[in-house]
Image (cartoon, helix red, strand yellow):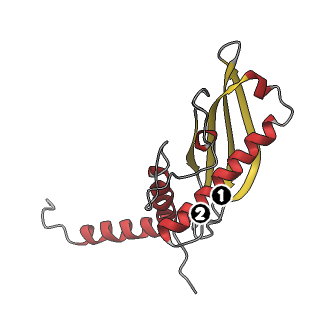
């Protein structure tokens, strides 16, 4: 049976994936990396370049995927706007799992927890900024109880301190 990854290995793997996802990034073959964002789609020469991206944030054993984009107000008024945002974050999660597997050789488990959140901020009569996030559980069971680690550390410290107090040659009487 394969050994379980610890939290440091997972964080290092996700960090390496995130280092390789900048706009215009290419893979080993020189092909452009397709994350599933709007900026990855081919644009006509007259179209304005789409500005969007994502990042990750860690909170305990959860990873929070955050997506941000500049959108037209007509897109915001669409009934499927939030559904499209949610599917974009799902595509980013899928990309993260796939790239993590490439980088580390191990599978990354992401289970959605909590609710999808989005926020739209109007910047002009035609454009707006949108931010969205969703939390995923990393599926790590080896995050041991911190109390047990503290108890082990406390025992080691008290053992060390007790050794120094048994013999004190500089004790003045």
Seen as rendered, the residue at the extreme top is 125
- Would residue 37 appear left or right of 111 to someone viewing this image? left
Distance CA(mark 2)–CA(mark 1)? 6 Å
Residue 93 falls in image quadrant:
bottom right
Looking at the image, how many numbered discs can be counted on the residues? 2
- Relative to 139, residue 130 above or below: above
The residue labelled by disc 1 is 94
Give the label on residue 113, or none: none
Residue at position x 87%, y 33% in the image: 79
- The image position of residue 127, as x and y in percent, is 67, 20
- Relative to 70, residue 145 above or below: below
Name the element at disc 1: helix
Residue 67 falls in image quadrant:
top right
Is the N terminus in the top left, top right, bottom left or bottom right quadrant? bottom right
Is 8 in front, or is 33? 33
Is the C terminus in the top left, top right, bottom left or bottom right quadrant? bottom left
- Would residue 62 appear left or right of 103 to someone viewing this image? right
- The image position of residue 81, as x and y in percent, is 79, 35
The residue labelled by disc 2 is 98
Is 156 in front, or is 39? 39
């Amino acid at each position: 049976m394969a050994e379980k990854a610890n939290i440091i290995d997972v964080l290092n793997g996700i960090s390496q994936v995130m280092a390789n996802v900048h706009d215009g990034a290419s893979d080993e073959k020189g092909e452009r990396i397709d994350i599933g964002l709007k900026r990855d789609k081919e644009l006509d020469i007259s179209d304005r370049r789409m500005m969007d991206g994502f990042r990750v944030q860690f909170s305990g054993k959860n990873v929070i995927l955050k997506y941000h984009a500049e959108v037209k107000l007509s897109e915001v008024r669409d009934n499927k706007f939030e559904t499209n945002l949610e599917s974009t974050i799902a595509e980013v999660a899928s990309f993260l799992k796939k790239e993590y597997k490439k980088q580390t050789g191990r599978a990354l488990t992401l289970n959605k927890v909590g609710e999808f959140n989005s926020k739209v901020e109007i910047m002009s009569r035609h454009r707006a900024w949108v931010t969205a996030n969703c939390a995923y559980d990393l599926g790590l069971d080896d995050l041991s109880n911190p109390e047990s680690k503290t108890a082990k550390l406390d025992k080691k410290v008290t053992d060390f301190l007790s050794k120094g107090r048994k013999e004190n040659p500089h004790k003045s009487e």
